[in-house]
Image (cartoon, rainbow, N blue to C red):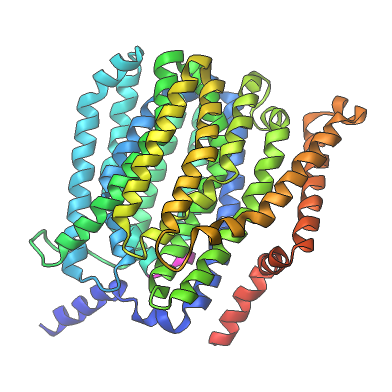
Amino acid sequence: MRIGAVARRDNDRPLRVDHLQSDLVGRSVRGGAVTFGAQALKVVIQFGTILILSRLLPPTAFGLLAMVAAITEILEQIKDFGLSAATIQKPDVTHEQVTALFWINTGIGAAAAVALWAAAPLVAQFYGHPELADITRWLALGFVMSGLATQHWALLRRQMRFNTVAAIDLSCELLAMATAVIAAMHGAGLWALVAQRLVYGAMVMLASWGMAGWWPGLPRRCAGVGALLLFGGSVTGNGVINVISRTLDQVLIGWFWGPQSLGLYERAYKLLMGPINQVTIPLYSVGMPALSRMIVDPQRYRRAYLALSERLAMVTVPAAALLIVTADWVVAVMLGSQWTDAAPILAWLGLAASLLPVATITGLLFLPQDRAAELFKVGVLGAAISIAAILAGLPFGPVGVAAGFAIGMTCLRIPLCFWMAGRRGPVTTADLYLSLLPSAVAAIAVLLVVSGLRMLAPLQTIGPLPGLLITGGAAVAVTLVCFSLIPRSRQALLGLLHLPRLALGTRKARA
């Protein structure tokens, strides 16, 4: 009995968050520094993977995998059912509640795997490529692994164990990359990409179980789970809507234009959205537990969110401006000569990417404030905008789809998101737009300066890599000058530059 009580207390320890309050800011700063350092390394790994695999495999290989991946992304959202967000966001959860959520996630993951396995012939028939049936069946196995890992991964984030999360993610990414590259070099072709996904999922599952320090009990009914399911259902509804609007472009291009065109679109999308996701996903990981604890102090919550949003825009908006005017060079360096048709796609997607990260993290305004139903409405309306824009561009090929997506996102979907997010709560719509002002000024300056440089005779004959180095250096210099001249962004810039020192300083203060 005594041993059982001790074991029960140890199993409850990963659920408690009361000890985080005493150093919440310090943990957030240190976690942000560690997480972004790890994500910077992950971006390097992913760029290296793109650079190597794009030269080893043809566009059709990436297009065929993207046909199935677009479907699996939707099922991935359903599998989670928003229950990881519920575990992270709720101030108090019990072992019984998390156990119930674990078995729900595991059951949904297994059901998704079975459904996708059974639907494999239909997927192949829809796209008109019989080889997709076997690919679909193998990718279905990933849902079993991710279902088993969902709650353990959420508990690591709930505890703000960002060092552990970063170490797991980075090591699994390295192993998956090595697997894909070695397989491709030995002639595995498309199956190298399938192996990459399965190895990553398996290693994340094993590592999260090993590091979370929590074991589920047997499945049983539990009080309080209904409220968590209701919260998770709203989050899932929004997630599914967003994924559908985000992947419909790839589904339609694959169906209408075939794997070659989809391969070009998918590589351009991955080249751009991969790094963006590596910024926004850890921001959620750090921001969700921290802002959920700060909501009791509205002004503190407001300052923290706006600081996060402003610093994110200072990085992504000028970078997107540089990408728009150097897309051809970026494609030549990162993908190689067989991918030149992807350059205009990348340029249009760069327009959408300029504000997409800032809009994405507005979920940190809805969820900590228990506004999941409003987030779902934003998702539905935003998805309708994106779907209409994608359909309008589809007859014009992948470039037309990218243009429609970018225009719809920039002119309609993001303003809608800002308006809905700022209607209630400490952060207003005006706050959101004002936080973007310095970044918008810097982006315009980058567009003008880099476009002017590219008109000079020496840069018209220079190679892609030297051209990127020159224009990239000029863009950084112009951006820093703009931020230094604006008082608001000058303070934020100092915060970005001193992030490592702040992390060490809070650690020393805690000691």
Q: Which residue is depicted at the point 20% across and 56% down?
A: 230
Q: Is residue 105 magenta?
A: no
The correct choice, above or below, for 119 with respect to 230 in the image is above
Which residue is at the front of the view, 131 or 122? 122
Which residue is at the front of the view, 270 or 442? 442
Q: Quadrant of residue 256?
A: top left
Rendering coords of residue 27 (x, y %):
49, 74
Q: Is residue 161 magenta?
A: yes
Q: Which residue is depicted at the point 11% across and 67% down?
A: 223
Which residue is at the front of the view, 246 or 382? 382
Judge from the rendering whether residue 344 lies leftward or rightward of residue 286; answer left or right. Answer: right
Q: Quadrant of the N terminus?
A: bottom left
Q: Which residue is depicted at the point 73% across and 33% down?
A: 326
Rendering coords of residue 41 (x, y %):
60, 52
Whether residue 37 is visible, yes or no, is: no
Q: Quadrant of residue 131?
A: top left
Rendering coords of residue 417 (x, y %):
45, 49
Whether residue 100 is visible, yes or no, is: yes
Q: Which residue is depicted at the point 79% across and 40% down?
A: 448
Q: Which residues are magenta?
A: 159-164
Furthest-left residue in view?
A: 221
Which residue is at the front of the view, 17 or 185? 17
Judge from the rendering whether residue 460 lies leftward or rightward of residue 468; answer left or right. Answer: right
Q: How many marks?
A: 0
Rendering coords of residue 233 (x, y %):
23, 51
